[in-house]
Amino acid sequence: MEHFINKIKSSLDLTSEAEEFLYSISKEKTISKGEVLIRQGQTVKKTYFVSDGCLRSFCTDKSGKEHTLQFAIKDWWISDFIAIYNNELAKLTVECIKESKVIEFNASKLNNIYAQFPEFEAFQRKNLEQHVVSLHKRILNQLQLTARERYDLFVEQYKDIEQYTPNYHIASYLGITQQSLSRIRVERAKN
Amino acid sequence: MEHFINKIKSSLDLTSEAEEFLYSISKEKTISKGEVLIRQGQTVKKTYFVSDGCLRSFCTDKSGKEHTLQFAIKDWWISDFIAIYNNELAKLTVECIKESKVIEFNASKLNNIYAQFPEFEAFQRKNLEQHVVSLHKRILNQLQLTARERYDLFVEQYKDIEQYTPNYHIASYLGITQQSLSRIRVERAKN
DNA sequence: TAGTTTTCTTACCATAGGGTTATTTTTTTG
DNA sequence: CAAAAAAATAACCCTATGGTAAGAAAACTA
């Protein structure tokens, strides 16, 4: 939690009231591999900040195939933002990939922070701007890169994530099958 | 311009000072088909609000192929947000698809609006939240839908855009070739 | 450590979509 | 309205990726 508070302090003047408020709407948790924090079809009441470890969000299509929207590592937020921002039921599942430490926030109380502590507005606006940037980049990559190129980029961006994430999760993030990824890895090892 | 101002007034209390500020940093323009508002490689100084018509943003890869990131119709914003939010040179080109009316904003002056008129913070935060939602949905669609399904959705979402947009632009948005889209259209006409 | 389960690889064939080029249709322009 | 340009379709074959299934390797678990 201190790490989280320090991160915030590095971008804004955190009053002790605001700090107290953050504590009052959150809870530190240790999550073990395989635990599900948000389940498709249910109401989304929480947002998570990852202090350590790794989680992922994915949707499951009619045929049962999973499609990974996001991997969240240290210092990232994860939840079903489609559901939260539109007040809908979860279309995504959020699952823990390796033992992780998270800070669990009550999403609707967190949403009140802006009214009570307006200094969080600019902070969040900038976060969202960066989120938009990374999503734009991801879409452009999906449009113009081959599966191989996307995988190369992925490895670069997420470094050691491969060590604890099954390949089929990575494949489902890249938009290919496990078998295709396996082929790509073989090719890649040759060069 | 009045339409734009009214849209803002519907979500926040616009003081006359703020309204004046908006006028002072913007200019209404009529853009004709083919005109380029932002060019890949150049500094991005403007953001555009589309009052009427249609524009698109795209990137051009090494082989010269174009990939459409966004179509902007009435009431949407368009620019190279990757460049603006990260203070980089444009990786995108913004081009006018049919005669359009836009409001051109000086991007850096627009960015000062939050400091001068904090009531715009929450407004913009909500805009960005919705932007994130639509990007999340687009990525999930790209991961789980076939080209045919993505095209069906596109037609539904953009209705009459087909009447004035060449198919190869739509194809480049969907992540397929013009020829594939043509095939899909033939298939679709049969059913 | 043996047994079980999960994950990864391989091989097969199938298919969606790509690349090239030619032809037709539509749109634009003089 | 004719000519030119742009866009759409079609036909060809090609390739990347998918689906299925089986076996190998790795990771758990008792």
Image: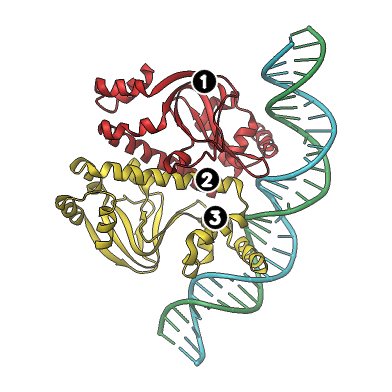
Chain colours: A yellow, B red, C cyan, D green
Crowding at mark 3 (Cα within 10 Å: few <14, some 14-19, many 20+): many
Is residue B109 among what the camera can see?
A: yes
Please state the horizontal and vertical placement of residue C28, each as a whole percent of the image.
Answer: 67, 17
Closer to us: mark 1 or mark 3?
1
Q: Nearer the viewer, residue A140 or B93?
A: B93
Q: In this rendering, is residue A96 above or below B30?
A: below
Instruction: Read off the chain for label 1.
Output: B
Please state the horizontal and vertical placement of residue D21, each as a whole percent of the image.
Answer: 65, 68
Q: Quadrant of residue A186?
A: bottom right
Q: In this rendering, is residue C11 above or below A124?
A: below
Horizontal side, residue A180 vs residue B50: left or right: right
| Residue sitting at x 24%, y 25% | B13
Q: In the image, which disc is placed on residue B100?
A: 1
Tags 3 and 2 on a common chain:
yes
Label 3 residue SS: helix
Label 2 residue SS: helix
What quarter of the picture does the N terminus of chain A occupy? bottom left
Crowding at mark 2 (Cα within 10 Å: few <14, some 14-19, many 20+): many
Q: In the image, which disc is placed on residue A173?
A: none
Horizontal side, residue A102 vs residue A65: left or right: left
For the residue marked with disc 3, what is the amino acid?
Leu
Q: Which residue is mark 2?
A: A139
Q: Which residue is mark 3?
A: A174
For the residue marked with disc 2, what is the amino acid?
Ile
Q: CA distance from mark 1 to mark 2?
A: 26 Å
| Residue sitting at x 29%, y 50% | A11
| Residue sitting at x 52%, y 25% | B54
| Residue sitting at x 45%, y 30% | B46
Please state the horizontal and vertical placement of residue B78, each as a whole percent of the image.
Answer: 47, 31
Q: CA distance from mark 1 to mark 3?
A: 36 Å
Closer to us: mark 3 or mark 2?
2
